[in-house]
């Protein structure tokens, strides 16, 4: 079992200089996935170091000590998350580790794992999880099947079925920058939100050793428009029918410039999305580089920059 380097820093188990500490304790179960997602460092064909998941380093840990520290050490951590790499032992390991975690720490638990069916989901909930995220990653069929090599309709229907059976307890991941348009991404987000599915939005991150290592991350202006549209839909401030698209790109949210400045001035739309208290510091970014998902409240300068990135190509 591994923990993110930021988790160990937050629990004072490792002295590491970090610019932002996580508010969720992240653990990785398993190594070398049976699946072969083109963007993932843990994919079957990946040559990346096993210590990596996205840009984050995950050292091996003594779980008893870490779970104990999680229950005792005063910190900003308010949730735990199991990032599960699919192996033959994955499901049994989730149940075992969830039980051990809950014995040591009274903390909410999310499990990121593509369960086979509602029976598996129910067992994970019974073991102590309050949320399960099944990673869609590729928003639309052509992207999903290209980068994941699986059947899109089968997965999407399972996601909706689980959301119906466990309302408010199912989530998913979406990665911007894999070849979808802004219009496609936002329309899928709109559908998922209508089914009460929690969405964690990621920016594609090229990782050395993966099949997509030479591809580029998404344009920051495009990502800001997706974040803004997602925020408007999630907060029920606008409907998708009020958005205007040209060639797949958002050109209007049906808002004036003044309304945009008022709604987005606090910077909340540009922060990390997903389960409650999940901030994933520098999961997609290098410290000092372009920040796609802010893991903390934005400074006035950062808010101004994000608004400029958002407004640059909008028709307002």
Image (cartoon, helix red, strand yellow):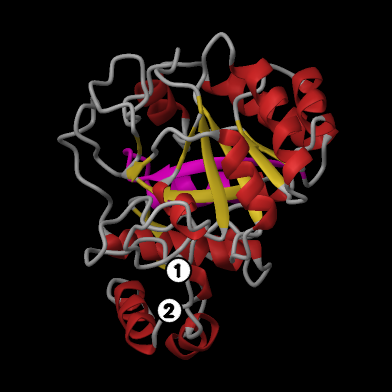
Rendered position, 134 above or below 223: above
Q: Decide which of 242, 30 is in the foreground and name it.
A: 30
Q: Mark 2 vs mark 1: which is more N-terminal? A: 1
Q: Decide which of 6, 226 is in the foreground and name it.
A: 6
Element at badge 1? helix
Rendered position, 297 above or below 257: above
Dividing the picture into quadrants, the one containing residue 298 is bottom left
Task: Name the residue tied to disc 1.
Answer: 270
Mark 2 burial class by Cα count in 10 Å: few <14, some 14-19, many 20+: some
Task: State the residue at coordinates (44%, 56%).
Answer: 9
Viewer-side label of 2, 1: 2
Rendered position, 257 above or below 205: below
Q: Residue furthest left?
A: 214
Task: State the residue at coordinates (49%, 22%).
Answer: 30
Task: State the residue at coordinates (81%, 24%).
Answer: 123
Q: Decide which of 309, 212 is in the foreground and name it.
A: 212
> CB of mark 2 within 8 Å of CB of mark 1?
yes
The tag on residue 298 is: 2
Residue 12 seen in the figure: yes
Residue 286, horizontal then vertical, whole percent: 25, 57
Q: Decide which of 191, 111 is in the foreground and name it.
A: 111
Confirm whether the magenta stretch covers residue 199. Answer: no
What residue range appears in magenta?
A: 169-190
Q: In this image, 67 relative to 2: left or right? A: right
Residue 268, horizontal then vertical, whole percent: 52, 74
């Amino acid at each position: 079992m591994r923990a993110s380097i930021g988790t160990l820093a937050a629990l004072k188990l490792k002295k590491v200089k970090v610019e932002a500490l996580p508010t969720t304790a992240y653990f990785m179960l398993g190594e070398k996935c049976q699946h072969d997602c083109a963007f993932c460092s843990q994919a079957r064909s990946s040559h990346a170091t096993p210590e990596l998941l996205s840009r984050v380093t995950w050292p091996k840990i003594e779980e008893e000590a870490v779970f104990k520290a999680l229950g005792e050490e005063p910190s900003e951590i308010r949730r735990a998350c199991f990032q599960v790499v699919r192996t033959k032992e994955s499901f049994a390991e989730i149940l075992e580790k969830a039980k051990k975690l809950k014995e040591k720490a009274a903390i909410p638990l999310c499990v990121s794992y593509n369960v086979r069916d509602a029976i598996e989901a129910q067992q994970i909930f019974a073991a102590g999880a309050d949320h399960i995220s099944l990673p869609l990653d590729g928003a639309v069929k052509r992207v999903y099947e290209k980068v994941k090599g699986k059947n899109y309709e089968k997965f999407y229907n399972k996601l909706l079925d689980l959301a119906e059976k466990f309302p408010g307890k199912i989530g998913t991941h979406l990665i911007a920058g894999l070849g979808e348009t802004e219009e496609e991404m936002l329309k899928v987000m709109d559908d998922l939100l209508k089914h009460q599915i929690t969405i964690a939005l990621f920016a594609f991150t090229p990782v050395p050793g993966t099949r997509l290592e030479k591809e580029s991350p998404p344009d920051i202006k495009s990502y800001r428009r997706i974040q803004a549209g997602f925020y408007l839909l999630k907060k029920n401030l606008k409907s998708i029918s009020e958005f205007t698209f040209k060639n797949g790109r958002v050109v209007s949210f049906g808002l004036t410039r003044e309304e945009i400045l008022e709604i987005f001035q606090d910077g909340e739309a540009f922060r990390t999305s997903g389960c409650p208290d999940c901030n994933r510091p520098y999961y997609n970014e290098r410290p000092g580089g372009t920040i796609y998902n802010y893991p903390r409240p934005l400074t006035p300068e950062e808010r101004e920059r994000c608004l400029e990135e958002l407004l640059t190509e909008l028709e307002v």
